[in-house]
Amino acid sequence: MAKTQVNLRMDETVAEMAKHAAETRRMPVNDYVAQLIRDDNEKLRHVFLAGAQHVLDEYGDLLDGIEAA
């Protein structure tokens, strides 16, 4: 997979926290940050899909009726 360079600016304390967390996990900081972003997006995807399922469960019959009209 092609890689794109992104420059981040963060407080020195946050940067040290990221370095420490990455070291603890035995991974490069780049991989650690990328994993955090993937995890965050996966959580958002799950919340969206759960919300969409709720709408379908609650209003599916109504939506089917509108579509049929």
Image (cartoon, rainbow, N blue to C red):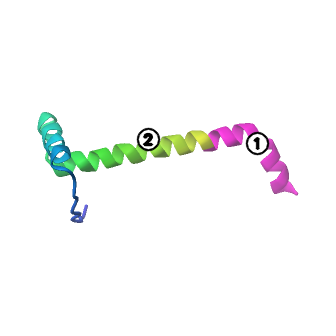
Near mark 2 (Cα within 10 A), the count class, few <14, some 14-19 or many ≥20, is: few
Give the CA distance from mark 1 to mark 2: 24 Å
When the figure is inspected, residue 64 is found, relative to residue 17, above or below; the finding is below
Task: Point out the image quarter for the C terminus.
Answer: bottom right
Give the x, y percent position of residue 7: 21, 63
**Magenta-colored segment: predominant secondary structure:** helix
Q: Residue at x 25, y 61 (%)?
A: 1
Q: Specify few, some or many for label 1: CA neighbours under 10 Å numbering under 14, 14-19, or 20 or more.
A: few
Indicate left or right for 36 with 66 as reference: left
Label 2 amino acid?
A: Lys
Residue 19 sits inside the magenta stretch:
no
Residue 58, how many percent across, how many down? Answer: 74, 37
* Element assignment for label 2: helix
- Residue found at x 76% / y 42%: 59
The answer to the question of whether label 1 and label 2 lie on touching residues, with beta carbons closer than 8 A, is no
- Mark carried by residue 59: 1
**Which numbered circle lies on residue 69?**
none
Q: Residue at x 75, y 43 (%)?
A: 60
Residue situated in front as seen by the camera: 7 or 34: 7
**Of the residues shown, which amino acid type is indicated by label 1?**
Tyr
Q: Which residue is mark 2?
A: 43
